[in-house]
Amino acid sequence: MEVSAIKAKEAFRDYKNGDEAILAVVKDNYYKMRTRQTVEYGQRMRKEYLKFNRPMNVWDAMMELQAFVDLSDPDITLPNVVHLIQSAEAMREQGRPDWMQLTGLIHDLGKVMFLWGKDEDGTSLKEQWGLVGDIFILGCKLPETCIYPEFNAENPDMADPRYNTELGMYEAGCGLDNCLTAWGHDEYLYQVLKNHPENKLPEAAMVMIRYHSFYPWHTGNSYEALLGPKDAQYKEWIKDFNQYDLYTKCTKTFDMEEIKAYYIPLIEKYLGKGPVYF
Ligand SMILES: [Fe+2]
Ligand SMILES: [Fe+2]
């Protein structure tokens, strides 16, 4: 697959030029996400969704994403499972490690939350503001590097003195792992896999899964005051991963039987043969 030849790099994540109907949906999703994701919401969603009582086969979970189109993504209107396969296949083509190929294949699997999600939580097919989109940290000042920074002031926490300063509810240098991120598919899948006894994915894979949507940090370079000793390494891993997450989006089709035959053994190697509990 000639991934780089499909679209110029500058043409991705363009929130100003493009199909107006798509851009309006993207913007609406970001408006709701920015103005409704508060500390209280983030804590409540973790209690509500991290119950790990839904066994699902990894391949079956992927296939469920045939019914899911990410409303926050201006670059893709295809079912999400296609994006997962494209990311993984680009890594495979370039000879990247097998665990990384698998990470590409599953990194957005947390979006299966939509199967039992709710409109009022922003976790459904129709309302995706608690499911997709660039994440940020809850409980401290929203940075200008967020997409549509003009929405920041409307987040209720930004009127709360506990949360509206650079450090907010955190200690300087506490590290990203000790911060409460906006709720979405990244944190969800990270927690699901962390809870999975047979998970043998390396730390780099878990970091790629957890922080791949954290653009204000990994691309915007915000949150300096909160970063801890591990976060420079985290950023290197994310940058490496991100090129496959972003620039492989195209309309190429695949031989699904071949894909399945190649990736099922990888799933079994790193996640076991049984179900994962979502
Ligand atoms: Fe994602
Ligand atoms: Fe992705």
Image: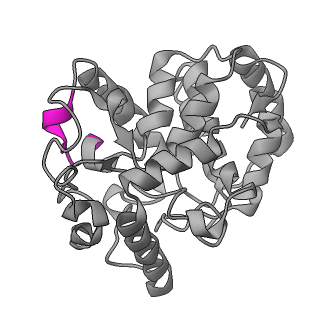
* Scheme by which the image is coloured: one colour
Highlighted magenta segment, given as a residue range: 218-227
Residue placed at 84% from the left, 20% from the top?
273
Q: Position of residue 88 (x, y in %)?
A: 60, 36
Residue placed at 50% from the left, 40% from the top?
187
Q: Position of residue 39 (x, y in %)?
A: 37, 51
In the picture provided, is 37 more to the left or to the right than 253? Answer: left
Q: Please identify the residue farthest to the bottom as the structure is shown.
A: 20
Residue 194, quarter of picture:
top right
When the figure is inspected, residue 12 is found, relative to residue 54, above or below; the finding is: below
In the picture provided, is 177 more to the left or to the right than 52? Answer: left
Q: Is residue 226 magenta?
A: yes
The residue nearer to you, when weighing 216 against 12, is: 216
Q: State whether residue 92 appears in this view.
A: no
Q: Position of residue 232 (x, y in %)?
A: 24, 24
The residue nearer to you, when weighing 161 against 246, is: 161
For the N terminus, give its image quadrant. top right
Residue placed at 31% from the left, 31% from the top?
176
In the picture provided, is 258 more to the left or to the right than 112? Answer: right
The residue nearer to you, when weighing 266 against 276, is: 276
When the figure is inspected, residue 240 is found, relative to residue 129, above or below; the finding is: above
When the figure is inspected, residue 243 is found, relative to residue 196, above or below; the finding is: below
Q: Position of residue 278 (x, y in %)?
A: 71, 37
Q: State whether residue 224 appears in this view.
A: yes
Figure label count: 0
Q: Main secondary structure of the magenta part?
A: loop
Residue 177, quarter of picture:
top left
In the picture provided, is 51 more to the left or to the right than 121? Answer: right
Q: Is residue 180 magenta?
A: no
Residue 143, quarter of picture:
bottom left
Residue placed at 41% from the left, 38% from the top?
211
